[in-house]
Amino acid sequence: MELLHLYDFLPSGHGYKIRLLLTQLGMPFKRIELNILKGETRTPEFLSKNPNGKIPVLEIEPGKYLAESNAILVYLSEGTEFLPYNRFLRAQVLQWLCFEQCSHEPFIATSRFWISILGKAEEYSEAIKQKREPGYAALNLMEKHLTSQDFFVGERYTIADIALFAYTHVADEGGFDLTQYPAIQAWIERVKTQPRYISITEDKN
Protein backbone atom coordinates (compact mmCIF):
# COMPACT_ATOMS: atom_id res chain seq x y z
CA MET A 1 0.00 0.00 0.00
CA GLU A 2 1.21 3.48 -0.88
CA LEU A 3 2.23 5.75 2.01
CA LEU A 4 -0.51 8.28 2.60
CA HIS A 5 0.44 11.95 2.28
CA LEU A 6 -1.51 14.50 4.31
CA TYR A 7 -1.36 18.12 3.21
CA ASP A 8 -2.01 19.99 6.42
CA PHE A 9 -1.68 23.13 8.56
CA LEU A 10 -0.80 22.13 12.13
CA PRO A 11 -3.12 24.57 14.00
CA SER A 12 -6.11 23.47 11.88
CA GLY A 13 -8.82 21.44 13.56
CA HIS A 14 -9.78 20.02 10.18
CA GLY A 15 -6.29 18.66 9.66
CA TYR A 16 -6.22 17.46 13.27
CA LYS A 17 -9.28 15.28 12.67
CA ILE A 18 -7.31 13.35 10.05
CA ARG A 19 -4.07 13.18 12.05
CA LEU A 20 -5.95 11.88 15.07
CA LEU A 21 -7.84 9.19 13.15
CA LEU A 22 -4.77 8.04 11.19
CA THR A 23 -2.77 7.79 14.43
CA GLN A 24 -5.56 5.91 16.20
CA LEU A 25 -5.88 3.54 13.24
CA GLY A 26 -2.13 2.95 13.36
CA MET A 27 -1.78 3.98 9.71
CA PRO A 28 1.57 5.52 8.80
CA PHE A 29 1.45 8.78 6.87
CA LYS A 30 3.67 11.65 5.82
CA ARG A 31 2.50 15.11 6.81
CA ILE A 32 3.24 18.02 4.49
CA GLU A 33 2.85 21.38 6.21
CA LEU A 34 1.33 24.23 4.22
CA ASN A 35 1.04 27.63 5.86
CA ILE A 36 -2.39 28.91 4.86
CA LEU A 37 -1.51 32.34 6.26
CA LYS A 38 1.22 32.64 3.62
CA GLY A 39 -0.99 31.58 0.73
CA GLU A 40 0.67 28.18 0.35
CA THR A 41 -2.67 26.51 -0.51
CA ARG A 42 -3.30 29.02 -3.31
CA THR A 43 -0.37 28.01 -5.52
CA PRO A 44 -1.04 26.41 -8.91
CA GLU A 45 0.66 23.23 -7.66
CA PHE A 46 -1.67 22.86 -4.67
CA LEU A 47 -4.75 23.96 -6.60
CA SER A 48 -4.09 21.08 -8.99
CA LYS A 49 -4.57 18.79 -5.97
CA ASN A 50 -7.59 20.64 -4.54
CA PRO A 51 -9.15 23.34 -6.72
CA ASN A 52 -10.90 24.66 -3.59
CA GLY A 53 -7.49 25.64 -2.21
CA LYS A 54 -7.99 24.30 1.31
CA ILE A 55 -6.39 21.77 3.61
CA PRO A 56 -6.56 18.98 4.55
CA VAL A 57 -5.99 17.00 1.40
CA LEU A 58 -5.16 13.30 1.56
CA GLU A 59 -3.06 11.86 -1.24
CA ILE A 60 -4.15 8.23 -1.27
CA GLU A 61 -1.77 7.23 -4.03
CA PRO A 62 0.23 9.32 -6.49
CA GLY A 63 -2.15 11.70 -8.26
CA LYS A 64 -5.25 10.50 -6.31
CA TYR A 65 -6.47 13.17 -3.89
CA LEU A 66 -9.36 13.51 -1.46
CA ALA A 67 -10.37 16.82 0.13
CA GLU A 68 -12.89 17.88 2.83
CA SER A 69 -12.03 16.64 6.32
CA ASN A 70 -15.26 14.77 7.03
CA ALA A 71 -15.20 13.01 3.65
CA ILE A 72 -11.64 11.91 4.46
CA LEU A 73 -12.80 10.64 7.88
CA VAL A 74 -15.49 8.49 6.23
CA TYR A 75 -13.02 7.15 3.64
CA LEU A 76 -10.42 6.19 6.25
CA SER A 77 -12.87 4.70 8.76
CA GLU A 78 -14.70 2.47 6.28
CA GLY A 79 -14.55 -1.12 7.57
CA THR A 80 -13.15 -0.09 10.98
CA GLU A 81 -14.58 0.27 14.48
CA PHE A 82 -14.69 4.04 13.96
CA LEU A 83 -17.66 3.78 11.57
CA PRO A 84 -20.61 1.56 12.56
CA TYR A 85 -21.76 -1.24 10.24
CA ASN A 86 -25.40 -0.77 11.26
CA ARG A 87 -27.18 1.29 8.62
CA PHE A 88 -29.03 3.57 11.04
CA LEU A 89 -25.97 4.15 13.23
CA ARG A 90 -23.90 4.99 10.14
CA ALA A 91 -26.53 7.52 9.11
CA GLN A 92 -26.42 9.01 12.60
CA VAL A 93 -22.65 9.43 12.27
CA LEU A 94 -23.22 11.25 8.97
CA GLN A 95 -25.90 13.35 10.66
CA TRP A 96 -23.36 14.58 13.23
CA LEU A 97 -20.74 15.18 10.53
CA CYS A 98 -23.25 17.41 8.72
CA PHE A 99 -24.11 19.17 12.00
CA GLU A 100 -20.42 19.82 12.61
CA GLN A 101 -19.98 21.41 9.19
CA CYS A 102 -23.19 23.47 9.13
CA SER A 103 -24.09 24.34 12.73
CA HIS A 104 -20.80 24.11 14.65
CA GLU A 105 -17.65 24.77 12.63
CA PRO A 106 -18.77 28.06 10.97
CA PHE A 107 -19.15 29.67 14.39
CA ILE A 108 -16.71 28.00 16.78
CA ALA A 109 -13.83 27.27 14.39
CA THR A 110 -14.08 30.61 12.58
CA SER A 111 -14.01 32.55 15.86
CA ARG A 112 -10.90 30.60 16.91
CA PHE A 113 -9.24 31.34 13.57
CA TRP A 114 -9.82 35.10 13.85
CA ILE A 115 -8.85 35.33 17.53
CA SER A 116 -6.09 32.78 18.09
CA ILE A 117 -4.57 32.08 14.68
CA LEU A 118 -4.84 35.44 12.93
CA GLY A 119 -4.67 37.38 16.23
CA LYS A 120 -7.22 39.88 14.95
CA ALA A 121 -9.92 39.80 17.63
CA GLU A 122 -10.41 43.58 17.54
CA GLU A 123 -10.56 43.80 13.77
CA TYR A 124 -13.20 41.04 13.61
CA SER A 125 -14.97 41.96 16.87
CA GLU A 126 -18.37 42.63 15.27
CA ALA A 127 -18.30 39.40 13.24
CA ILE A 128 -17.16 37.46 16.34
CA LYS A 129 -20.15 38.81 18.29
CA GLN A 130 -22.46 37.52 15.56
CA LYS A 131 -20.94 34.05 15.89
CA ARG A 132 -21.63 33.83 19.63
CA GLU A 133 -25.32 32.92 19.70
CA PRO A 134 -25.24 30.19 17.01
CA GLY A 135 -21.98 28.84 18.46
CA TYR A 136 -23.51 28.49 21.90
CA ALA A 137 -26.64 26.99 20.34
CA ALA A 138 -24.46 24.20 18.90
CA LEU A 139 -22.80 23.65 22.27
CA ASN A 140 -26.18 23.58 24.02
CA LEU A 141 -27.40 20.87 21.65
CA MET A 142 -24.25 18.83 22.19
CA GLU A 143 -24.50 19.23 25.96
CA LYS A 144 -28.09 18.00 25.97
CA HIS A 145 -27.16 14.98 23.85
CA LEU A 146 -24.15 14.08 26.01
CA THR A 147 -26.02 14.25 29.30
CA SER A 148 -27.58 10.88 28.48
CA GLN A 149 -24.70 9.13 26.67
CA ASP A 150 -20.93 8.96 26.68
CA PHE A 151 -20.35 9.35 22.94
CA PHE A 152 -22.35 10.75 20.04
CA VAL A 153 -23.45 7.55 18.31
CA GLY A 154 -24.16 4.05 19.60
CA GLU A 155 -22.38 4.51 22.93
CA ARG A 156 -18.97 4.10 21.32
CA TYR A 157 -16.19 6.34 20.04
CA THR A 158 -16.59 7.03 16.31
CA ILE A 159 -15.58 9.60 13.72
CA ALA A 160 -18.60 11.63 14.87
CA ASP A 161 -16.70 12.23 18.12
CA ILE A 162 -13.45 12.99 16.28
CA ALA A 163 -15.15 15.52 13.99
CA LEU A 164 -16.84 17.35 16.86
CA PHE A 165 -13.92 17.08 19.27
CA ALA A 166 -11.46 18.83 16.96
CA TYR A 167 -12.87 22.32 17.41
CA THR A 168 -14.94 21.85 20.58
CA HIS A 169 -11.98 21.09 22.84
CA VAL A 170 -10.28 24.34 21.76
CA ALA A 171 -13.49 26.40 21.70
CA ASP A 172 -12.06 28.62 24.45
CA GLU A 173 -9.48 29.78 21.89
CA GLY A 174 -12.45 31.25 20.03
CA GLY A 175 -13.84 32.92 23.13
CA PHE A 176 -16.41 30.27 24.06
CA ASP A 177 -16.77 29.38 27.74
CA LEU A 178 -16.96 25.60 28.21
CA THR A 179 -17.15 25.72 32.02
CA GLN A 180 -20.94 25.82 31.80
CA TYR A 181 -21.00 22.49 29.92
CA PRO A 182 -20.13 19.63 32.31
CA ALA A 183 -21.28 16.89 29.92
CA ILE A 184 -19.12 18.28 27.11
CA GLN A 185 -16.15 18.61 29.48
CA ALA A 186 -16.55 14.99 30.62
CA TRP A 187 -16.80 13.85 26.98
CA ILE A 188 -13.62 15.79 26.11
CA GLU A 189 -11.79 13.90 28.86
CA ARG A 190 -13.18 10.58 27.57
CA VAL A 191 -11.90 11.33 24.09
CA LYS A 192 -8.46 12.18 25.50
CA THR A 193 -8.27 8.74 27.15
CA GLN A 194 -8.86 6.86 23.88
CA PRO A 195 -5.96 4.66 22.69
CA ARG A 196 -3.29 6.44 20.64
CA TYR A 197 -4.71 9.87 21.35
CA ILE A 198 -2.59 12.82 20.15
CA SER A 199 -3.04 16.51 20.89
CA ILE A 200 -3.84 19.09 18.23
CA THR A 201 -0.29 20.49 18.37
CA GLU A 202 1.43 17.11 18.13
CA ASP A 203 3.37 16.50 14.93
CA LYS A 204 4.19 12.81 14.53
CA ASN A 205 6.26 13.39 11.38
Image (tube, helix red, strand yellow):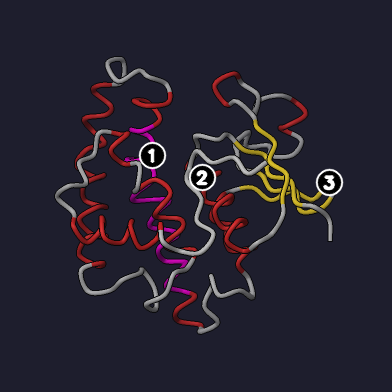
Q: What amino acid is found at the position of numbered circle 3 in the picture?
A: Gly
Observer-side mark, 2 or 3, equals: 2
Q: Secondary structure at mark 2?
A: helix
* Magenta-tinted stretch: 91-112
Q: Of label 3 and label 1, which has the lower sequence position? A: 3
Q: Read off the residue under disc 2.
A: 14
In the picture provided, is 86 more to the left or to the right than 3?
left
The residue that disc 1 covers is 109
Q: Are marks 2 and 3 in contact (CB under 8 Å)?
A: no
Q: Disc 2 residue type?
A: His
Q: CA distance from mark 1 to mark 2?
A: 9 Å
Q: Residue furthest bottom?
A: 86
Please tell me whether residue 106 belongs to the stretch shown in magenta.
yes
Q: Is residue 103 magenta?
A: yes
Tell me the crowding category of disc 3: few under 14, some 14 to 19, or many 20 or more residues within 10 angstroms, Cα based: few
Whether pointer 1 and pointer 2 mark residues with C-beta atoms closer than 8 Å, the reply is: yes
